[in-house]
Structure formats: structure tokens, C-alpha cells
Amino acid sequence: MPATSLDQIVSLCKRKGFIFPGSDIYGGLANTWDYGPLGVELKNRVKKAWWNHFVRQCEDMVGLDAAILMNPRTWEASGHVGSFADKMSACRRCNKLTREDHWEGLILQSEWYKSLQELYFSKETATLEDLKKWGEKTAKKLAPNLALVRNSSVTISWLAEFLEKTSIATKEAVDNVHILSSMRQLISYLATEQFNQTGLQLPCPYCGGELSEPKPFNLMFKTHQGVLEESSTLVYLRPETAQGIFVNFKNVVDSSHMRLPFGIAQIGKAFRNEITPGNFTFRTREFEQMEIEYFFDPAAQDWKQLYENWKERSEKFIEEVLGIKKENLRLRDHDPDELAHYAKRTTDIEYKFPFGWGELCAAVAYRTDFDLNQHQTFSGQDLRYTDPDDPSKKFIPHVMEPSFGADRVTLAVLIDAYEEQTLPNGDVRTVMHFKKGIAPIDVAILPLSKKENLIRKAQELYKKIMYETDLTVHFDVTGSIGKRYRRQDEAGTPKCVTIDFGTIGEDAGQGPPDTVTVRDRDTLEQIRVPINGLLEALKGS
Ligand code: GAP
């Protein structure tokens, strides 16, 4: 069975050392996460696979590693100072903040809403009386700041009055909350106390209190460079790695003599003061991006065709390189009103997370010549590209941008690999089916017992694999062999190599001398392999 809730993944991640809560011994720091021994290997492999796929194996790509702190003019030029803002509302009761475009998702996930929905749909005719009772019992606990809880008679009377006024209202209908056109309207009534003064109020997803009017909130983290905390020393933590690429466009062209079309890739940290972070590492305030800015001449290349090509290249990385299942992926084009200020068109790859479909990455965004033009204007530098075949031809290239979050992609890899499997003997094992090459450990060496000559032989093999291949190898001698197999299954190790008394020529019943048992994580098949063919077998499998 795959993971049905994020809690299963969070718990496995902590238990196995993939991901720990940040600052754990101090009670944590909300929405920060630290990658443990297995997690850092897994994320490094995701990043390495990305770099191989998009940079090392492509003639038209080069890399970059720009500074996180940049001249603040960068962010004026890019539009982030002016428009990198989300609309947010504050709850007038609990003070929690809710991003306007996350309100619906948060409401749907809230316990009080789920319970109300049950009441609404479970009874053919849920009455105002039922609603009142729900307010007195359930909502009192789950959403204590709903107007229905604080002042139920007034709220119910507003609701009844509204129902009376509607043209479809009949005596029966007044008592029947089903006539409300939507749950949204219903919960707004339940959150409204002074209808005449305030009109309908939207409820806070956390406590049911009234939300304020949404206001824009800039997401960039600010700090100061140097000792003085004044406006002249203000700098921002970069909210995207992309701008480091744009400001280095001229340096790269001049130093590397790249000809259009070509791309510059970068992996690095980005920071956003997210209003509603959450869902484990899905949305955090500090995260890592893997981004490409692909520059081209719009007069020489059809942008629509290039756009489709990049969509395919991004999909190929997610499906074929990382091995994420196709049925858990879908493409989604941005509606015109949700496009970022710089984008003419954007297509996301979405993943089916346990909490619903969510953006995994931007497969591609067409940023036109927006960024280079802006930087040219703000910096006063000539950022035009000169055609090497016709030096009189100078122009600002256009840009395609595939943008991946390393943490979000790693989270999807973890969720996609997870399976709770019931074995024929009735045992349940948790197994992580990471794709070979993505798994944090490639091979585990397991001596059957702690006997000295067995350990010596196992250590010999361990070092041979470590030094003579690029496989990541792990040595484990603690616990029964069955327990060790389970541990490696949870770590997602594709192959376990067991060294037994047959290997050292002391028990022919266990196997011929100089042979080992290789166990496959997915099929559970165990085969006997001669030691002198082991490296080949492990590399090829
Ligand atoms: N340069 C374009 C850009 O930054 P974006 O859609 O805002 O576009 C790209 O971000 C990717 O970065 C997202 O698809 C996601 O994978 C990742 N990402 C964005 N915000 C994130 C956050 N708060 N936490 C984790 N990952 C995030």
C-alpha cells in the first residue's frame, strides 16, 4: 500500500534519518527541517541526477554558483520589491495569517470543516437545529471562534433570515441548510456576527474567527550587510536563484563564448517568508532550487516549439531519471490571472501528494526578454547579445525557464517510493522503492555473525566496493539478519550482500567458498554470486 498520509512519511524520515525537525533539541523552529545521514545522500543524488541530465549531458548548457546576497537593485529590477507579494488576511481572533489563495485548501483540510461537511452531507435534511447543536458541541472544540459558537442565536437568526428572503425559501427550505448554494456561503454565515455592519465574513481555517480584508505582503527576507542596520545596508535573501543567472549573463557570454541558444543552470538556496508554510518540506521558508535560464533568439526559433521541448525535457527528468510514477503526475497550465509578473506562459508538473495535487516544479515558464531588459535598464549596462556571425546584429535574448525545488522533488521521491507490503508469511514490511542510482545507499554488506574471520572477510569486500566503484556502500553487523534486511528495505537499499560461513569455507551447507548471497530489495530474490563477479553483478543490476 502506498503512503496515505504525510504523517507516515514524516515518521519514517525521522526514524530512519532522512529528515529531522529543525533545531529539535530546542523544541524546533516552525517549518524548518534538517536532512539526516540518509536524507542528505538522497537529496544530493537528486541534485546530481538533475545536473547530469540538464548540464553535464548537454552541449548547450553551462553551470553557475552565484551569491545568495545580491545588490538590492537586482530585486527592484526583477520586480520582486514591487510585486513579489501574496495577499494575506489575519484572523481577528487568533491572529494567524492565511494566504488568500491557500484559504480554500486550508479550510478543506481543517477538522472543523470536515465535521461540518459530514453533518451537511450525511443527513438528507440537516436543520438549523442540527447546526446549532453542532456549534454547541463539535465546533466549540474545533473552531471556538466561529460566530456560531460565540453567539449562536444571532448567527442562526441571520442565517434563517437569509433563507427566508431567498426566492426558493419555503417553510421546509428554511429549515434545510441544503438550499445554500455552497458550503462557502454556509461557513461565511457561521463566521458572521454583525452582518449589517460587516457583511459576510470569511472564517479563519484554524479557529473559525473572522478574517481581515486580504492585503499584499512582500515575501522577501530582509537583513543588513555590515554592522549598521540602516536603509543603505539593507539586503535581501534571494527569493529565487534565477536572478543570479540573469546578472551574470554578460559575464558568461564574454568568458565562455556561448552561442545562442544556450542555457545557464544553477542549484542553490532560496528564501521566502511564506505566509502559510507547511505540509512537511513541501512549502518552507528556506529551500533549494534547481533552475535553468535558457536564452534564445526569438527571430530564429519558434518559442512555442521550444516551450514544448522544455516541457518534455522536464517531464523526462521527473519520470525517467527519478522514476516517479506517471500516474501520480499531471501537467497544469497557469491561468492568465495566476501567471507571475514576468511570465507569458507557464506549465507546472503537479504531483499527487497525500494531501492532494500540488505543484512539484515549473516544467517551463516563458520569461520573454523581461529580466534582461529590466537589468539593462536598472544597471545601465549593455546586456545585448552580439551575433558572432553578424556583429551588427545585437539584441536581448528571450528566455525559457524550467524551475525545480530540490526539497519538493526529494519529498515526491520519498512519497512515491514508499510502500507498506504484506509478505506471504503475514509480516508487514515498509520498503522504499527508490530508483537505482537515486537510493541513498546502493549496497549493504551484512556479515551473518560477528565472528572475527567473517567480519574480516566482510570488511575486505566493503572496502573493495567503496574504493573500486562509485557505489555507496553501508556496513551493518547489528541485530538478526532479518532485522537488518528490514532496516535496509526502509532505507531503500536495492541490494544486500550477505557474507556467511559458506563464504569463508566453513559451512558448505550455506554455500560454496568465495561466494556471497545477494538479496534484491523489490523481488526479495536471493542469489549466490562468486566474489570475483560481485562488482560486475552489483554495477549491472
Ligand atoms: N524562478 C521561478 C520560480 O522561482 P516558482 O514557481 O516560484 O518559480 C519554482 O518556484 C519551484 O521552486 C517550485 O515549483 C517549487 O518546486 C519550489 N518552491 C517554490 N517555493 C517553495 C517553498 N516555499 N518551499 C519549497 N519549495 C518551493
Image (tube, rainbow, N blue to C red):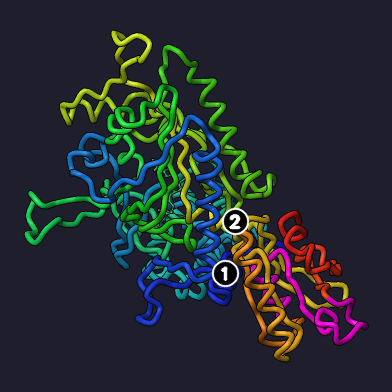
Q: In this view of the protein, which residue sits in the foreground, 275 or 438?
A: 438
Under mark 1, the amino acid is Asp
At 52% from the left and 23% from the top, the residue drawn is 306
For residue 432, say whether it is visible.
yes
Q: Position of residue 16 (x, y in %)?
A: 58, 74
Q: Residues within 10 Å of mark 1 (few under 14, many from 20)?
A: few
The reply to whether the C-beta atoms of the residues labelled 1 and 2 are less than 8 Å apart is: no
Q: Position of residue 47 (x, y in %)?
A: 50, 51
Q: Nearer the viewer, mark 1 or mark 2?
A: 2
Q: In the picture, residue 515 is in which quadrant?
A: bottom right
Of labels 1 and 2, earlier in sequence is: 1
For residue 185, say whether it is visible.
no
Image position of 51 (left or right of 246): right
At 35% from the left and 55% from the top, the residue drawn is 274
Q: Position of residue 409 (x, y in %)?
A: 53, 52
Disc 2 target residue: 413
Disc 1 target residue: 7
Q: Is residue 25 above or below residue 154?
A: below
Which residues are drawn in magenta?
484-513
At 47% from the left and 37% from the top, the residue drawn is 402
Residue positioned most to the bottom:
451
